[in-house]
Structures are given as structure tokens and as C-alpha cells.
Amino acid sequence: MSLTKKIKKDFRSLYGLIFILLAGLRLFFNALIPLTDKTEARYGEVARLMAETGNWIVPQIDYGIPFWAKPPLSTWLSAGCISLFGDSEFGLRLPYWILAILIAFLMIPYGHKKKINGLIPGIILFTIPEFFLHAGVLSTDMMLSFSLAITMMGFWEFLHSEKNLTPGLLFFVGMGLGLLAKGPIICVLSFPPLFIWCILHQISFKKIFNMPWLKGGILALLIALPWYYLMEKKSPGFIDYFVVGEHFLRFIDSSWSGDKYGFPKQQPLGIIWAFLFIGSFPWSFVLLGQLKHGFRKIWNDPWQLFLWLWILWTPLFFTFSKSLIHTYTLPVMIPIALLITHHWPTSKRKKTMILIALALPILLFSTYFLEPAQKIISDSTDKNLVLHPEVDPSKLYAFPFKSYSSQFYSKGKIKVIPLDRLEKMVEDTIDFSIIIKKTGLKDLSPEVVNKLNPVMERGKDGLYQLK
């Protein structure tokens, strides 16, 4: 039976229905949840600015201010969707949902090899909380995960194929895309586990040298190098900031003063392992259960060891980092799903695990419409303040600073206003609307505060107009 017919058969089953429901549920959230501060709204604004200004080489965090933190591949995808569908949340998030679907499809043959429904790996993947979350979040992590998956799978398939250069070239395509998605970190996350695996399994140098290093290397450089060259030319200083700062200093110094866009993150040593365990629940328990069969079986099984090295290397690398977030574990969720798929035919309580894993997305859907959930979502973005019926975007200000979401939803029209000018506008009774952070209210005189009418107040800020 051809692969196409097998996939059609997969979708006609109960597993096909489950996969469609999971993917559809994530698409539902993508359309309704506003862009939240800081990360998602920041990347949304960078994409909006790229589409508006037509500057596809130098990403911008504000008009005329370059965004050096990440390469542009994810921004290109979102900005392209803005050009096609407008700057809706659905359009901005669509590329990341498509990438998640593509990853699930890449895993279908691995399900077929175990003689099970090919969508089971995708179902496992979409019920991993960390992956389900990022199947619709604006960030660079999903593109990095996709690139790393192509790199790792391409390497494995090349070594286990006969005179087929395609997987080998895919290895280098993944490297090139990774360099455009998040930078040299693609090399850090892929080369060490591959090198260790080759040593442990005594892979001959001949097999490794048979990789299309010359053609593939040129292909990877053709994918990534032109943008790096043009970016440094048009925005001098980018290479020093991005390579030295983002790929070295930020991981050893949590107070790195060079970080232009984030904020210091002092995390306990080893917290990455907690992120991994919680982010992959409940499948993390399944992984731990597999270890009880002994390390010898893993050691002697090339595929299992390959996946375990892929899983463990990333958290091991970040164990001693002083600055990290839970999203760093996202690329690891793919080998977790593949490893669980490997044991699926012999696993007990399959239905129980599926039901437990489905509980999280079902719970998210059932609680989304409740008032507490709506309040949490509303408080994480300034969308409702900016789009309030009484607000004229051309007369909208922020004090003492503007959020990325206010910048995005006002289409860049919101302006930060100095204290002296704010006081002058109040004194002259000029009509305007202003978003004031609670921390900024204490800087205003009682006279100014008394003349401001709170149109909408929240825990962290509020929308005000003249009385």
C-alpha cells in the first residue's frame, strides 16, 4: 500500500478524528486569544512592522529601530501572512500551526514502521503541553524545532538508506533553516548528540564521510548566509550582538546588560529539568517507566539511544545556564513523541494514557469561556484598552512606557509621553487617551490624577481620559 493510501486510512480511523480535533482546537485558540505581552506581542509587532515598511532584511522593534535578537525566518512567515490575510491573530499564528502539522506528518512513517496508525505520534505530540502551547504562539522556537527535526531525522535516515542523498541533503537544509530561525544554536543542539551517538555505536567514518558535505554545506550556506551578510551591511553591529551576546553572554550571565529586548532571568540551576518534566506531562511518566527495563536495552538499541541522546542533550546543555525559559525544551518534545511511539505496540494502558493526555486540551477549552480565564487573558494584553470604543488611536499615549501589545494593536500609533508634557496637556485640557501603568501613577501629582477619568482599570494599568 502506498504512503498516500496509508495516510488516508489513518485519517478515516478514530485516531484520525482525535488528531483533527486536537489540531482544530489549537486553531480555535489561535483565532480568539489576543497577542499577549511580552514575547508574543513583541514578535507580532516585529512582523507587522516588516509587512508595513516592506523592509524584509532588517527586522524592526519600532520604527527605525532594528531588532537584533533573532534571525528573521519566523518573522518572514508571519509578515507574509499579514500581507495575505491582514494583521489578525489567526493570520500571524497560522505559520506556527502549519509547522506543527508538518512535524506531525514527518512522524507518520515512524508510526507505520511500528505497524500502528501513523497519526499516533502526532496525537502524542499535540497532547504534550509544551508542544500544544507552541502550535500557535508567535516565537522562533517552533521553527527551530522543525529545523532540528529535519536535521536529526535526515542524519538518521541517511545512515540507514542505501545510496539516497535526499536525507543527507535534508540534514543540511535543516541546518540552514535553523541558522535563519534562531542562529548557531542549531549546531549546538544537533552536533554533540549526533557525535556521541556515532562514537557509542562505532559508526564508521566512511558512512559519515558519505554525507554530501560539500553539496550540503553549500546548500546550507546559500539558505542562511545571504541574509546574515545583508543584515550586517545594513545594520552594523548585529553579528557582534547576536553571536557573542545572544549565544554566549546571556547563558552565563543572567544580568547581561547587553540584552536589548528581554529582561534578566535568574533561574535556579537545573530548573530546565523541571521544565522538561512538567512540559511533557503526562508522557514524562511514560518515559520514566521505560527506564525501569534497564539501560542495557537502550544502549544496545541504536534508535532508542539516538532518541534519548536527542532528548537529554538540550536540558543537559542548559542545566548550568543562568538565563533560560521553559520554551528551550520545545525541540525535545519531538523525540519524546517518537520514543513513546517506539514502545507503543508493547505499552499497556494505551487508552488510559490517551484519555489522560487529552484532558489538558479539553480542560483548556472548557475553561476558556469562564470569567477567571477571560480575566487572565485580558490582563496579559492591552488589546481591550487600545481598541476601546472611546479611544482615538491618533490621540493615544502611554506612560511611563508602552507595551508591545499596545504598539501592535494601535498599529504603531501609540506614543510614549514625557511627564512634563502629560501635565501640560492636562492643564490645557487637550483631548487624549492614555494607558498608565500603576507604577507610573505615583509619579503624577494629585492635581493631574484628579483630572483623569479611569475608563478601564486593571491590576497593572488602566485607560484614562480627561474628565
Image (cartoon, rainbow, N blue to C red):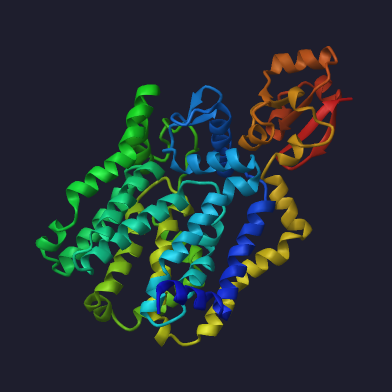
Residue 180 percent location from the top left of the image: 38, 42
Q: Is residue 218 above or below residue 97?
A: above
Q: Is residue 387 above or below residue 6?
A: above
- At 72% from the left and 57% from the top, the residue drawn is 373
- At 11% from the left and 65% from the top, the residue drawn is 204
- At 17% from the left and 70% from the top, the residue drawn is 201
Would residue 385 appear left or right of 308 to someone viewing this image? Answer: right
Name the foreground residue: 417 vs 388. Answer: 388
For residue 134, say whether it is visible.
no
Would residue 303 appear left or right of 24 to someone viewing this image? Answer: left
Residue 181 percent location from the top left of the image: 41, 44
Q: Which of the 4 image quarters holds residue 453?
A: top right
For residue 200, say whether it is visible.
yes
Name the foreground residue: 46 vs 311. Answer: 46
Q: Which of the 4 image quarters holds residue 200?
A: bottom left
Would residue 312 appear left or right of 205 to someone viewing this image? Answer: right
Residue 298 percent location from the top left of the image: 27, 77
- At 77% from the left and 21% from the top, the residue drawn is 445
**Quarter of the image that includes the C terminus:** top right
Residue 150 percent location from the top left of the image: 35, 57
Q: Is residue 155 above or below residue 226?
A: below
Would residue 439 appear left or right of 277 to someone viewing this image? Answer: right
